């Protein structure tokens, strides 16, 4: 392993021990998901133990060098020891819950310290400091003045809350990370290794590569498609961005604009159903609704978000006269699908399972198993030239796998074992087996930053649950915004954006939803809409300076300042910032209440408003805007966002006037020329 890359190096460069730890982590997660051999408490403890082991084996105390191995192994094994302690003494811990022994206190303190230090090594100091403040509040908050003071809790009560039970470090975020999130990360990892990125980029290139602004549209479409399997914005930037950013620069886009398009598109992938980002699974568990309801609420805002970015890219290309690739240099979209159609089978099955009411854990397990079967099966049968034999093979394999519904998951594992054995003896099959091993290890690697964030924010959940401080903060928000919902929404948005300067989307959502979402609910905002509002701006925080994580991930690829990329990303996504506000005032935009016509009306109104804002911030439609046109278009868009009497009618009228006079003036100019 390169001393300067850590987990970012290719798994082929890792030390053998690290490779096997990551492989064991993935196998542990698959077995516990498929067969449920342990309780949920032990499942979470094992997840945390493996995360700590991986972090301490890779990340040094400071700098980029490889950690000093004797100390690394001591800390890694200490992290794993907390798992075995929870497992071995599970019954005793349940019986003496709340009455900790000396050994319990030691294990609890070690676990808390290891989690804080692991998070610092992986994500920097911002999140540990925020969680440390909550921990200090739990220990010393009784000495604060006024309503912020609580009744006082001993250190044993705080340790019991955080290190044992399911309301602290082993809380809901950790459970979601140990089940849904890990399975979907593995699912995406297998599809990436199998060539799904190539399928998506070729498909997008075939559809849009030859059109005006084609390379930027390819970036947008491929990132949206990648979001259906990964749900990770930064991961999308560093995968699809390696191809799309240089392509955009080659055809005349500025480096900062190219990076901004990729960052904006990739962050939007977290709200693109069916998979979305990790936060969506946490949200479903937190508010106790089926995951499909979260995906349904996110669908129209996601389409409006990507529609606004696509519109901005198109206008910028027209304004700068940037054409696409020659059509003969673009791959055929349908050839790309024809060559790799089998990779879409697990994705379609996953979507069907999610939207048919199955749990995300069931859908993820089946989707992952199907992906492995498709990869291994294709290694065996695609070498044959006979179409009839191929069809017969896939039909027979499908019939055997259907036995899963009668005989259980063991059938699937049996099929995979047979395919693995067959690949061992087929020419080229061992290479496919190596790809599968790579996918398992890659899944463990991608799970580390997400998992550690989920574990550490358990400190916030535990202290909030123990002290009830959320109701105090909610009271302040209600007092400020009791007569002005817009002001409360604005404060919540600013909180999300400020928190996002130092912490990832998951802890950002958990902190803000714990404090602000209950207040919005009391102000009459529907439950799922209030949480989606927080989720949406938690994602936007990764585009806003000064931190802008997605933009800085794009910076080395674009060879441009992350700050410049961030400023372009905000400009490209500016129309998308208004969508959550519109959804709060008209929940039909998230398919919450109202009939089909109300939803269609809101979709058309929001689309027109976003279109006007895109024109204003680009400064171009059929030609460059006059100085007085921009304020007119901005006012028309703003009126349609407000949910006041006659504002829709005024906004629609002004918007049509703005567009019609501009197109008429542009036509006259062309005729004169």
Image: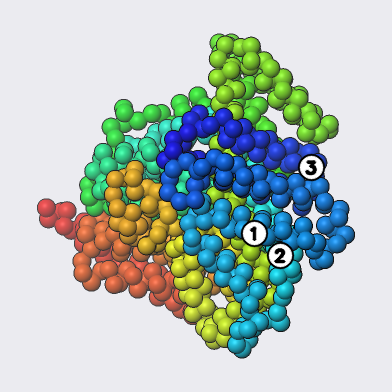
- Going by the picture, which residue comes out furthest to the left? 673
Question: Could you tell me how far apart the alpha carbons at marks 2 and 1 are, in whole angstroms?
Answer: 8 Å
Q: Which residue is mark 3?
A: 36
Q: Left or right? Give the position of 452 relative to 571.
A: right
Residue drawn at point x = 52 percent, y = 78 percent? 488
- Residue 616 disc label: none
Q: CA distance from mark 2 to mark 3?
A: 28 Å
Q: Residue at x 24, y 52 (%)?
A: 319
Label 3 residue SS: loop
User: Dot 3, how many residues are within 10 Å of its Cα: few (below 14), some (14-19), or many (20+)?
Assistant: few
- Estimate the spatial distance between the alpha carbons at disc 3 and disc 1, rounded to whole Å: 26 Å
Q: Is residue 611 left or right of residue 660?
A: right
Q: Position of residue 312 (x, y in %)?
A: 34, 55
N-term mark: 2 or 3? 3
Which residue is located at x 62 percent, y 58 percent? 113
Asked if marks 2 and 1 touch (Cβ < 8 Å), the reply is yes
Q: Which mark is residue 159?
A: 2
What SS does tag 2 mark?
helix
Displayed quadrant of residue 371: top right
Q: Residue 148: horizontal and vertical position, in percent?
A: 62, 83
Question: Which of the two labelled residues, at mark 3 and mark 1, occupies the earlier sequence position?
Answer: 3
């Amino acid at each position: 392993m390169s001393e300067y890359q850590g987990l970012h190096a290719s798994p082929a460069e890792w030390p053998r021990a690290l490779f096997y730890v990551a492989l064991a982590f993935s196998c542990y997660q698959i077995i516990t998901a498929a067969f449920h051999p342990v309780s949920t408490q032990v499942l979470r403890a094992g997840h945390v133990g493996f995360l700590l082991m991986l972090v301490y084996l890779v990340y040094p105390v400071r700098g980029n060098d490889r950690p000093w191995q004797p100390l690394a192994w001591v800390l890694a094994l200490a992290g794993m020891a907390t798992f075995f302690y929870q497992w071995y003494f599970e019954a005793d811990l349940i019986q003496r819950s709340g009455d900790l022994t000396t050994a319990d206190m030691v294990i609890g303190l070690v676990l808390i310290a290891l989690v804080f230090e692991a998070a610092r090594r992986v994500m920097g100091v911002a999140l540990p400091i925020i969680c440390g403040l909550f921990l200090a509040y739990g220990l010393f908050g009784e000495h604060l003045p006024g309503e912020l003071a609580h009744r006082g809790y001993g250190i044993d009560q705080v340790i019991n809350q955080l290190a044992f039970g399911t309301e602290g470090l082993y809380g809901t975020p950790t459970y979601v990370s140990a089940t849904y999130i890990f399975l979907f990360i593995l699912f995406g990892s297998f599809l990436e290794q199998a060539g799904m990125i190539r399928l998506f980029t070729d498909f997008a290139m075939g559809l849009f590569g030859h059109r005006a602004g084609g390379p930027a549209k390819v970036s947008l479409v491929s990132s949206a498609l990648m979001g259906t399997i990964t749900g990770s914005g930064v991961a999308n930037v560093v995968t699809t961005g390696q191809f799309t950013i240089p392509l955009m620069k080659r055809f005349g886009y500025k480096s900062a604009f190219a990076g901004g398009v990729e960052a904006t598109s990739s962050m939007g992938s977290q709200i693109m159903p069916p998979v979305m980002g990790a936060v969506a699974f946490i949200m479903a568990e937190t508010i106790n609704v089926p995951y499909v309801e979260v995906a349904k609420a996110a669908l129209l805002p996601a389409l409006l978000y990507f529609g606004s970015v696509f519109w901005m890219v198109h206008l910028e290309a027209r304004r700068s006269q940037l054409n696409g690739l020659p059509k003969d240099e673009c791959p055929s979209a349908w050839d790309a699908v024809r060559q790799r159609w089998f990779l879409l089978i697990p994705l379609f099955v996953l979507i069907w399972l999610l939207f048919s009411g199955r749990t995300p854990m069931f859908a993820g397990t089946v989707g992952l198993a199907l992906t492995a079967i498709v990869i291994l099966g294709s290694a065996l049968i695609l070498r044959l030239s006979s179409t009839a034999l191929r069809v017969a093979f896939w039909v027979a394999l499908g019939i055997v796998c259907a036995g899963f519904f009668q005989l259980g998951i063991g059938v699937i594992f049996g099929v995979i074992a047979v395919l693995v054995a067959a690949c061992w003896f087929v020419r080229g099959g061992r290479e496919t087996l190596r790809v599968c091993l790579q996918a398992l290890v890659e899944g463990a690697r991608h799970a580390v930053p997400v998992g550690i964030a989920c574990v550490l924010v358990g400190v916030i959940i535990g202290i909030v649950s123990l002290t009830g401080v959320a109701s105090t903060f909610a009271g302040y928000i209600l007092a400020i915004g009791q007569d002005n919902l817009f002001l409360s929404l604005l404060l919540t948005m600013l909180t999300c954006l400020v928190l996002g300067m130092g912490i990832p989307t998951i802890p950002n959502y958990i902190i803000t939803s714990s404090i602000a979402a209950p207040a919005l609910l009391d102000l009459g905002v529907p439950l799922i809409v209030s949480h989606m509002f927080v989720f949406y701006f938690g994602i936007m925080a990764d585009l806003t300076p000064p931190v802008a994580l997605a933009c800085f991930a794009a910076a080395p690829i674009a060879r441009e300042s992350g700050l410049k990329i961030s400023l372009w990303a905000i400009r490209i996504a500016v129309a998308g910032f208004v969508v959550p506000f519109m959804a709060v005032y008209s929940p039909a935009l998230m398919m919450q209440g109202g009939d089909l016509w109300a939803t269609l009306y809101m979709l058309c109104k929001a689309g027109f408003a976003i279109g006007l804002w895109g024109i204003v911030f680009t400064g171009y439609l059929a030609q460059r805007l006059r100085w007085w046109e921009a304020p007119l278009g901005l006012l028309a868009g703003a009126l349609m966002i407000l949910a006041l009497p006659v504002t829709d009618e005024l906004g629609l009228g002004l918007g049509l006037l703005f567009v019609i006079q501009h197109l008429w003036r542009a036509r006259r100019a062309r005729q004169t020329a």
